[in-house]
Amino acid sequence: MFSYSTPIRIHYALTDQMGVVYHGHYAQFFEIARTEAFRHLGFTYKSMEEMGIILPVVDLHTKFLRPVKYDDLIKVTITLRELPLHHKIVFHGEITNETGELCTTSIVTLYFMEMATMRRTTLPQQMKDVLLPFFQANPDTPH
């Protein structure tokens, strides 16, 4: 299993008239976490595009449990529970507030696609090589 967390401070422009984060922004929060997780692994969307791979979102489920408000410092965590072996990669997400309360959950599915043909493809070998150690059974290795 691979997990990565990133903090985000909520600025005023992200809130709605009710003083809470507008629901449409949550997809961006999970996108930021995925982008930073890829960067942590040594990849960027740009580097994947240079390999001829794009990653469109094909499915997004979000559950709102608690409001997030202006100036809150949230932690956005994404987790890969399974090594992506085929054309899709599924991220499970959580947003917690400063006191550790769970505020939002998500499941986001992206497809690996060839940029030139717009056809599905598999996980690039370079990324598989980096992710594989997180999914190998070794109780002595923290992830």
Image (tube, helix red, strand yellow):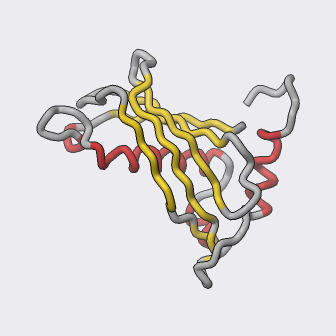
For the view shown, which residue lies furthest in the top direction? Answer: 99
Identify the residue at image location x=53%, y=35%.
Answer: 77
Identify the residue at image location x=54%, y=34%.
Answer: 5
| Quadrant, the C terminus | top right
Q: Position of residue 106 (x, y in %)?
A: 48, 41
In-front residue for pair 7/123: 123
Vertical order, 12 against 102 (above or below): below
Q: Quadrant of residue 141?
A: top right
Q: Where is residue 109 in the image (x, y as percent from the top left)?
A: 56, 54
| Quadrant, the N terminus | top right
Q: In this view, does 12 lie to the left or right of 31?
A: left
Whether residue 35 appears in this view of the structure is: no
Whether residue 106 appears in this view of the structure is: yes
Identify the residue at image location x=81%, y=47%.
Answer: 132
Vertical order, 143 against 26 (above or below): above
Q: In this view, does 31 lie to the left or right of 16?
A: right
Q: Quadrant of residue 126?
A: bottom right
